[in-house]
Image (cartoon, helix red, strand yellow):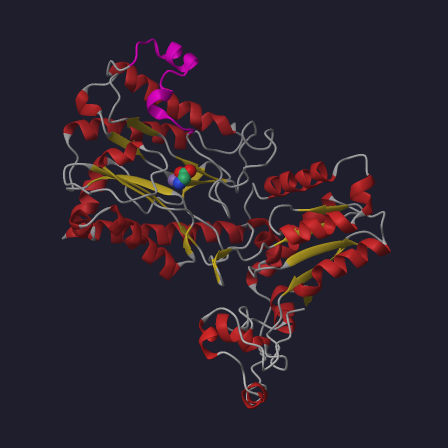
Amino acid sequence: MSEERTPDKPVKGRKNGLYGGISDELGAGMRSGWADTERHDLEPSEPSGYAAKRRKAVSAAFPGERIIIPAGRLKTRSNDLDYTFRAASDYAYLTADQTENSVLVLEPLPDGGHLATLYLLPRSNRENGEFWLDGQGELWVGRRRSLAEAAVELGLEIRDSREAAARIAEAIAAAPNVPTRILRGHDLPLDAALAEADVVRREEAQPAAERDEELKVFMHGLRLVKDDWEIEQLRKACEITVHGFEDVVRELAAAVATSERWIEGTFWRRARVEGNGVGYNSIAAAGPNATILHWIRDDGAVRPGELLLLDAGAETEELYSADVTRTLPISGEFTELQRKIYQAVYDAQEAGIAAVRPGARFRDFHEAAQRVLAERLVEWGLLDGPVDRVLELALHRRYTLHGTGHMLGLDVHDCADARCEDYVDGVLEPGMVQTVEPGLYFQRDDLTVPEEYRGIGVRIEDDILVTADGNENLSGGLPRSVDAIEAWMRSLRG
Ligand code: GLY
Ligand code: MN
Ligand code: MN
């Protein structure tokens, strides 16, 4: 329970510190005079139905076991200020909720299946003053939904999250032979409480860490194929992202006058207004910064005549992210050399996208794209052929640097811990969504390439849905070819 404060106790932190103590009269007055705002008009949310189906899959995979999925905790930035909270992806996936400090518990039932209980922070208590005196009180952070409201919207048994650790310990004490798995690393106090309470985890032949790892791997495998609602979310993330890229093109002159930060901020504003924000730190890389794969300082100069590599993706309110890259001529037109390099990456991406279809190996698109890039590097005299030798020895990697794509969803690098046989060594199925993002990068200090190549980096990245008979480019709202990009930039800049 939260700490009870008394009127004579000074309130620490926040701006309240200036006021010192609380008079009896103020303390008493703050308890009353508030309207009843409980909502009785709510209905189950649309995603809650999908979350229920996903919980069934978890229940079927772990019969007779207790499964614990925490949302994660607020992280302190400094003193009494926190970082913006972002719920753990598996938690959001299984609950359709995003509240901090929450925990989903699936308790096995004697006759099979599980009882799902969600532990949430309730509305603030006004009697004991927490609503205005506690840093997480609603007066400070905004109204929360009540537990009754959450039960309706989420279709779950709901309890107070401040009781979660004690309730889980009770359940363990009552049924000590029920194996327990937790998604570790999101709620460290709960991880520790569980380690204390769970006799089975301490005594079992299979170490608890291994069992927990199995749960994580299972969750990532479960998330590989997206349901209809998730696909709509990814479509929306791509739509917002298209708007963000359009904004950036319109504002290139302001970026030239300032720095890459203008581009980062412009995209961020759109992502924040139409969605939850950005799904990852935007890479706004102008000129030679484009050759630095994770350039997120975004503080360089933006110069006409050079290229801008913008790798940015909006995240929807429901936490699904796009991951899109366009490489744009800052002046609006590619130079001859930029066009040549861009075209090679475009052709590689086309080959990669063509290899995304149900039944194909996940690796196929990477191999198809890399072959095109290796061919061009040999053709330009940057690598000695034949191409098969280059590919066998992976000599092209000096300039292509990274894999050609990854799964996409709630996480940008989605399902990263799925089993190899289900993902990197697996076969594509309808409903999977992946990126295709080949690139060529010539470092500014790379003496193996002619001087005019140095400092040029090009990546093109799109988000590709595997359909029943091929694929669909969810980020196809943005132009990709040289001509289409130049025409698009002209139209936006007037
Ligand atoms: N934006 C990170 C990536 O493309 O994988
Ligand atoms: Mn990207
Ligand atoms: Mn990517």
**Placement of 41 over or under 440, stated as above or below:** below
Q: x, y (%) of residue 354?
A: 40, 31
Which of these two is toward me, 388 or 270?
A: 270
Which of these two is toward me, 189 or 149?
A: 189
Q: In which quarter of the image is ligand 1?
A: top left
Residue at the image position 37 percent from the left and 13 percent from the top = 390
Q: x, y (%) of residue 331?
A: 14, 42
Looking at the rendered structure, the number of numbered marks drawn on it comes to: 0
- The stretch of residues the image draws in magenta is 383-403
**Placement of 481 over or under 157, stated as above or below:** above
Residue at the image position 67 percent from the left and 42 percent from the top = 215
Q: x, y (%) of residue 176?
A: 85, 50
Which of these two is toward me, 399 or 344?
A: 399
Residue at the image position 49 percent from the left and 70 percent from the top = 141
Instruction: State yes or no: residue 386 in magenta.
Output: yes
User: For residue 439, which quarter of the picture?
Assistant: top left
Q: Is residue 95 left or right of residue 296?
A: right
**Placement of 5 over or under 236, stated as above or below:** below
Q: In this view, does 90 lie to the left or right of 240?
A: right
- In the rendered image, the quadrant that contains the N terminus is bottom right
Q: Is residue 5 visible?
A: yes
User: For residue 203, which quarter of the picture?
Assistant: top right
Q: Is residue 226 left or right of residue 405?
A: right
Q: x, y (%) of residue 74?
A: 54, 58
Q: Is residue 157 visible?
A: no
Instruction: State yes or no: residue 256 in magenta.
Output: no
